[in-house]
Amino acid sequence: MSAITDSDLITDEKVDFVLSEAKEQLAATVADAEALTKSGVYLLGGLLTVITALVGVTSAQFVGAKSLSEQRWGVIIPLLATTLYSAADAAMIMWSALSSKELEHGGNTPNNLATQELFQLETRLLKFSEALSYQDRIEKNHRRNEQIGITINRGIKMACAAPLIYLLLVALTYIIAPSSFHP
């Protein structure tokens, strides 16, 4: 599409429509961001629950009456590795997907609107200028939401892989050192 060069084409009805659509689209990107944040919070809550359980199970494997060399390391090491893997997944979600910074909301500050240049414009052109200012925000929110969605999807895949990693580590430990499973 080409840019509008003739301001006479910008009628009150058209600019009201464009402004309404721009505000609606920007509000939709903010709503999408809120939904992604909820998904991230649920995922993080699930991961923290799993991590807490893994820490409990891991600590239950230690026997206080035995020395470190006599502990059941064949069971403990896979649990520790899975716990650390899950903690890294939770940290990635927390730092990447739950950040509300960089989210652009609707509206303009008075400093943006109360300028000499804008007050010289007719109201229809002022509204059109406001509608155009939403375009960058909409695109920025789309990029942000896409990146957060990718991070959440990666986090879900990593969470689903954790039990498989644990089983693989247990199998490898049993193959390498079967005696480490006996008390």
Image (cartoon, helix red, strand yellow):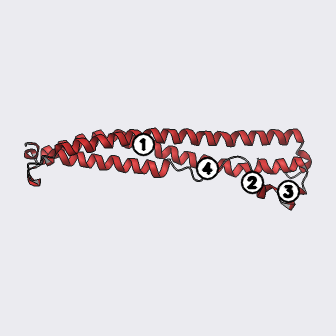
182 lies left or right of 165? left
- Amino acid type assigned to the residue bearing label 2 in the image: Thr
Q: Which residue in the protein does label 4 denote? A: 103
Q: Where is residue 157 in the image (x, y as percent from the top left)?
A: 39, 41
Question: Quick one: label 1 or label 2, which is nearer the N terminus?
Answer: 1
Q: Position of residue 45 (x, y in %)?
A: 41, 40
Label 2, on which residue? 109
Amino acid found under the numbered disc labelled 3:
Leu
Work out whether 84 lies above or below 41: below
Which residue: 85% across, 50% down?
A: 126
Identify residue for label 3. 118
Q: How far apart are marks 1 and 2 (CA)?
A: 34 Å
Work out how far the residue at label 2 is from the one at label 4, CA to CA, in angstroms: 15 Å
Badge 1: few (under 14), some or many (20 or more) residues near its Cα, within 10 Å? Answer: many
Residue most toward the front?
65
Q: Which of marks 3 and 1 is nearer the N terminus?
A: 1
* Label of residue 44 in the image: 1
